[in-house]
Image (cartoon, rainbow, N blue to C red):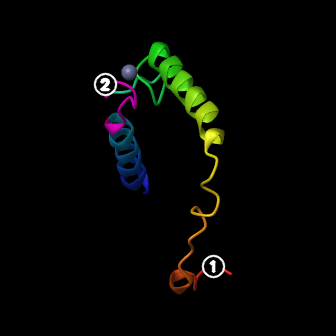
Amino acid sequence: MNDKIADLAALRAQKRRAKRKCPVCRKPASEASRPFCSEQCRRIDLDRWRTEAYRIPVAENDEEDSVPKPAADNDEES
Ligand SMILES: [Zn+2]
């Protein structure tokens, strides 16, 4: 009875998955190395990520500037 709904959900999931693109080179991602298109791109992204992570702690005098919190929009969080 629910076969159609299940089918639809599967189809949607498939479509969504097909839309996924490799964040490195924008080619369609492959099942094996999602969300990347290949192991190579996975490694490139990891490398990038690592160099970014190393670079971030270098910020020195930004501490005072990084805490401007507008009090108006904070109603939902406590
Ligand atoms: Zn790629």
**Front one among 60 and 8:** 60
Q: Main secondary structure of the magenta part?
A: loop
Query: Within 10 Å of the Cα at label 1, are there few (<14), some (14-19), or many (20+) other Cα atoms?
Result: few
* Residue placed most toward the observer, 72 or 7: 72
Asked whether residue 22 is drawn in magenta, I would say yes
Estimate the x, y position of residue 39 in percent, counting from the top left. Answer: 49, 15
Q: Check the image and report above or below for 62 versus 48.
A: below
Which secondary structure, mark 1? Answer: loop
Q: Amino acid at mark 2?
A: Lys
In the rendered structure, which segment of residues is drawn in magenta?
Answer: 19-27
Element type at mark 2: loop
Point 56% across, 33% down: residue: 52
Residue at (52% x, 86% y) in the render: 72
Q: Nearer the viewer, residue 53 or 18?
A: 53
Residue placed furthest toward the right? 78
Name which residue lies at 56% across and 83% down: 71
Q: Residue 62 in the image: state x and y as whole percent.
A: 60, 55
Tally of marks: 2
Q: Reply above or below: 59 against 33.
A: below
The quarter of the image holding the C terminus is bottom right
Compute the Cα span from label 1 to label 2: 39 Å
Q: Is mark 2 within 8 Å of ligand 1?
A: yes
As rendered, which of 71 and 57 lies closer to the eye? 57
Tell whether position 77 is magenta.
no
* Location of mark 2 (residue): 27
Q: If the picture is divided into quarters, which one holds ligand 1?
A: top left
> Which residue matches tag 1?
77
Q: Mark 1 belongs to which amino acid?
A: Glu
* Figure check: 72 above or below 5: below
Question: Residue, x 60% and y 40% (percent of image)?
Answer: 56
